[in-house]
Every structure is written in C-alpha cells, then in structure tokens.
Image (spheres, helix red, strand yellow):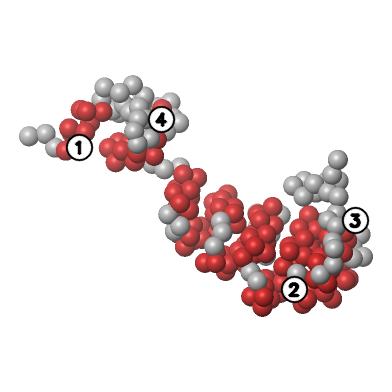
C-alpha cells in the first residue's frame, strides 16, 4: 500500500512549477512540482520543505520567527559572529513593538555593530514604548552616544532624547547645543525645548538621510 508521502507526491506531480524554481533556484531537485494555490505560497513552501527538503532562507526563517513572536529565538542571533546574521536579527527586533522588547531595544540602541540606522530605530521604539520613570534606563543608555564620532548617531540619539523628554538628559543636551554639526546642535536644542514643554520646531532636515530638507 502506498505511504501517505507517496500519495502526496503522486497528487502534486501534475503541477507545473518545480519546487527548486519556487524556492528561487534553477536546479531541479526532484520530479515533484508545485504551483502555489490555496492556501497560498506559505503552504506550498511548507509542503516543499516536508516532501523534498527545500530549506528556509535565513531571511524567511527570521520573518517566520517574528510572525510567531518568538523574539528570544531571533535575539539568539545577536550573538552570532557573522555580522550579516546579527544585523539581520537586530533589524527585525528594532522594528518590532511591544513591552517585552524593551530590553532588546536597549541592547540594540547602544550597539555600533550594524551602523546607525538600526540603533536609531531601536531608540525610536523605546521613545514610543516608555513613559514616566521607565524612561530613565533608556536615557542613561543613550546619553553617552552624544559623544559618538558619527554625527548621524549623535543627531539621531539627540532626537530620541527629545522624544523621551526626560529631565535627566538636560545637562548633556545643554552641552550638545554647541556640537560642531549644525543638525546635532539643532536636535539637542529641540530636545531641550521638548523637556521644558515649549512649542518646539524641528530642524529642517530629511531624517532618513540626514541631509537638509528641500
């Protein structure tokens, strides 16, 4: 009597898209062919993996873990010796929201391993998530970054401190107003205004690139 897997192979064999092609490879790994139908590509990928061993790519694995909110499994990759792996995990975690991620965001915001954008994202998440005295650990972690040699780190963290708007940042931000980079100085001024509760105008810049706004 045919096994369940053999019957599944027979049933799927008439479809026209090779499994290896569906996974992005030109190599035909088996005679089994699949065409995404109901319930969609995710199911096809799962069947493909079950029957003929098509493995998830690292990015697909990370996205799946994030959908499952298995943040600990994603965070385990932060310790990887491979920068690409560690930064992929940091990027996914930095974009995610939730009180359970505060500790991860604090870890990512002070790391220089992955450039300035990923720590900036983590800082913005902290500003969204934290209120009251819960902001103090984030402020303490971020303040030393205003001395970074990278002006993009400095102005991003100055902006995050303004979003956190905690008075503990006042002395360092006051010094930061004299930063040689005009945008760093402008964001420090804006952040001090935010802490004092004033009517604050943001610097005229593109926060995505760090260039002056049109």
- Mark 3 — residue? 182
Q: Secondary structure at mark 1?
A: helix
Mark 1 or mark 2, which is nearer the start of the sequence? 1
Disc 3 versus disc 1: distance between alpha carbons? 66 Å
Q: Nearer the viewer, residue 186 or 20?
A: 186
Mark 3 vs mark 2, foreground winner is: 2
Q: According to the image, label 1 marks what residue? A: 5
In the shown orientation, is residue 30 left or right of residue 205? Answer: left
- Mark 2: which secondary structure? loop
Screen quadrant of the N terminus: top left
Alpha carbon distance from label 4 to label 2: 51 Å
Which of marks 2 and 3 precedes in the sequence? 2
Alpha carbon separation for disc pair 2 and 1: 61 Å
Residue at image location 61% in from the left, 65% down from the top? 129
Q: Residue 165: x and y, percent?
A: 75, 69
The C terminus lies in quadrant: top right
Residue bearing the label numbered 2: 166
Q: Quadrant of residue 95?
A: bottom right
Q: Earlier in the sequence, mark 4 or mark 3?
A: 4
Image check: 178 left or right of 19?
right
Looking at the picture, tell me which residue is in the foreground, 26 or 34. 34
Is residue 116 shown above or below 32? below
Which is more N-terminal, label 4 or label 1?
1
Q: Residue furthest left?
A: 1
| Labels 4 & 2 near each other (Cβ < 8 A) | no
Residue 76: x %, y % from top left: 49, 61
Task: Give me the C-alpha separation between circle 1 and circle 4.
Answer: 20 Å
The correct choice, above or below, for 160 with respect to 212 in the image is below
Secondary-structure class at tag 3? helix
């Amino acid at each position: 009597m045919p096994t369940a897997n053999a019957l599944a192979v027979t049933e799927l064999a008439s479809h026209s898209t090779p499994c290896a092609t569906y996974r992005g490879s030109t190599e035909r790994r088996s005679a089994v062919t699949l065409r995404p139908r109901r319930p969609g590509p995710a199911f096809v990928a799962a069947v493909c993996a079950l029957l003929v061993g098509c493995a998830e790519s690292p990015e697909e694995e990370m996205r799946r873990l994030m959908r499952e909110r298995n943040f600990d499994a994603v965070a385990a990759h932060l310790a990887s010796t491979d920068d690409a792996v560690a930064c992929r995990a940091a990027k996914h975690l930095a974009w995610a929201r939730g009180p359970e991620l505060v500790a991860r965001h604090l870890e990512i915001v002070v790391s220089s391993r992955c450039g300035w954008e990923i720590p900036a994202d983590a800082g913005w998440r902290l500003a969204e998530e934290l209120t009251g005295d819960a902001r103090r650990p984030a402020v303490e972690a971020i303040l030393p970054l205003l001395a970074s040699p990278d002006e993009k780190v400095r102005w991003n963290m100055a902006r995050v401190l303004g979003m956190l708007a905690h008075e503990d940042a006042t002395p360092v931000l006051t010094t930061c107003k004299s930063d040689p980079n005009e945008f760093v100085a402008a964001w420090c001024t804006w952040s001090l205004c935010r802490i004092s509760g004033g009517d604050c105008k943001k610097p005229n810049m593109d926060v995505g690139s760090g260039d002056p706004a049109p």
